[in-house]
Image (spheres, rainbow, N blue to C red):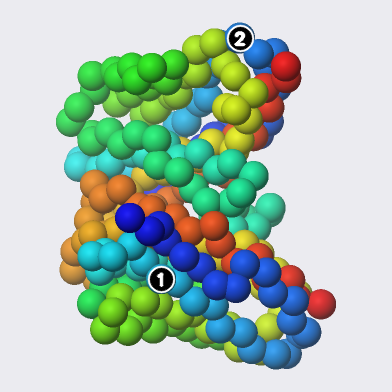
Amino acid sequence: KAGVTQTPRYLIKTRGQQVTLSCSPISGHRSVSWYQQTPGQGLQFLFEYFSETQRNKGNFPGRFSGRQFSNSRSEMNVSTLELGDSALYLCASSVGGGMNTEAFFGQGTRLTVV
Amino acid sequence: AQKVTQAQTEISVVEKEDVTLDCVYETRDTTYYLFWYKQPPSGELVFLIRRNSFDEQNEISGRYSWNFQKSTSSFNFTITASQVVDSAVYFCALSERGFGAGSYQLTFGKGTKLSVIP
């Protein structure tokens, strides 16, 4: 069974640009969550999608957005990049995203903003 | 707000020593789940264990064991006879109710970096 796949693995962007990250969940998983990991703030929840609907959102500015397609694949977009957006972005998928759900994580996309 | 605290930022042990990673959490919910994840250098978080708030029975799985004490809001993780392959960052997490119906999110501690020296 294939795991969670995130592409690309590495990205270097310039301040002010926008970027799109992709996540392919495990087959059959309908919930996809995104997390930002930085040395200072640790792992922070960005948002969760379930059946193409954003069901939950963390405390991030509107520059961070996402979507989910009918095949459960998800993308997140960051517009007007800032230096502080440099981070490892992790995607996690689960069957239903419930309280007791084991989330499966991808290897992440490491974004560097210069 | 819910919170997870891992007071140990980094720990170094010599191979075959036992090591305990501490986790303290805060929540107002009566029903909740706690998790431990491991993050090796490759980056992905690997699920280790989950425990619900009504199950305080401690668990042992091979060299791993977990001690959940609701009275002290702690969920500690012990590795017995540590090995070099155990070197990773370990995260404790609390499942927190989200805004949307049926939605939950993981609130993570800052992690403990474990280095096992041969």
Name the residue that disc number 2 marks.
Answer: B17
**Counting other residues with Cα less than 10 Å from the Cα at mark 1, is it few (<14), some (14-19), or many (20 or more)?**
many
Say which quadrant the N terminus of chain A sits in.
bottom left
- Residue A45 visible, this orientation: no
Question: Which residue position holds label 1?
Answer: A24
Indicate the chain on which mark 1 is placed: A
Q: Is residue B86 above or below residue A7?
A: above
The picture places residue A29, in percent across and down from the top left corner, at 26, 64
x, y percentage for residue A46? 46, 69
Report x, y in % for residue B104.
Answer: 29, 59
In screen coordinates, is A16 left or right of B47?
Answer: right
Identity, as a three-letter code, of the amino acid under mark 2? Glu
Quarter of the image with the C terminus of chain A is bottom right
Quadrant in which residue A21 is drawn: bottom right
| Residue displayed at 78% across by 84% down | A14
Front residue of B85 and A95: B85
Q: Marks 2 and 1, Cα distance to the nearest angstrom?
A: 39 Å
- Mark 2, chain letter? B
Q: Amino acid at mark 1?
A: Ser
Q: Quadrant of residue A63?
A: bottom right
Residue A75, label in figure: none
- Who is closer to the viewer here, B103 or B114? B114
Q: Residue at x 21, y 61 (%)?
A: A96
Between marks 2 and 1 in the image, the one whose residue lies nearer the viewer: 1
